[in-house]
Amino acid sequence: MYDFDVQIIKIADDFFEAYKRCIKPQNIHRDDYGRTVGYAVNVPAIVNASFACELYFKNMINEKTKNHNLKFLYDKLDEKIQEELETKISQEITKLNYETEINCKKDFVKYLDDISDTFVFWRYIHEKNKPTGFLGKRINECCQLFDIILPILKELSNRNATNN
């Protein structure tokens, strides 16, 4: 027996919190040019963020799965939840200030497809010669995207839980 709450939503919240702690700048100091800089731990941030997303999705679907693919899990959601998620996140994504291969359309489903395998990809990044793909070279954009997605997913997951 565990001495803490192991509900999927609580564990998702823990991974979301871990993500926030990982992206919080630490060791803030002045560099050789007089700029104020701080360091974040980006790879653990991305792994924690993507796993939090996975758990929030799993909290809203009625089926047990070991699949980590975010698009796969999104496709398992009730259509009304998908629509609300897409609407809310798409509104926020339009505020992002970078261009992508998506030609600035900033379509949530396309972004979701691009980050679907981030948990597995970034968890095993040490086995790669170099990062590839949409977010492979743009860690900051990946974190910006998770900054948008996670609070909305958390809210919807709390409202639409099926796996308590």
Image: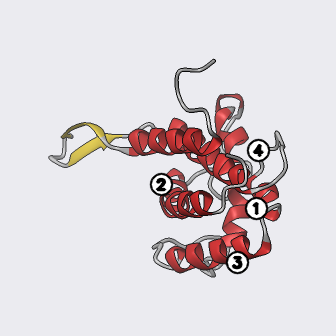
- Describe the colour scheme in one phrase: secondary structure
Q: Is residue 133 visible?
A: no
- Mark 2 or mark 4, earlier in chain: 4
- Mark 2 or mark 3, earlier in chain: 3
Mark 2 to mark 1 CA distance (whole Å)? 23 Å
Looking at this view, name the residue that lies furthest to the top.
1
Residue, disc 1: 74
What's the residue at 64%, 52% (across, down)?
Answer: 56
Callout 2 amino acid: Asn
Residue, disc 2: 140
- Mark 3 or mark 1, earlier in chain: 1
Mark 2 to mark 3 CA distance (whole Å)? 27 Å
Q: How crowded is the residue under tag 3: few (<14 C-alpha within 10 Å), some, or many (20+)?
A: few
Q: Position of residue 149 (x, y in %)?
A: 55, 62
What's the residue at 53%, 36% (across, down)?
Answer: 44
Query: SS at mark 1?
Result: helix
Query: SS at mark 4?
Result: loop
Mark nearest the camera among 2 and 1 is 1
Residue, disc 3: 83
Mark nearest the camera among 2 and 4 is 4
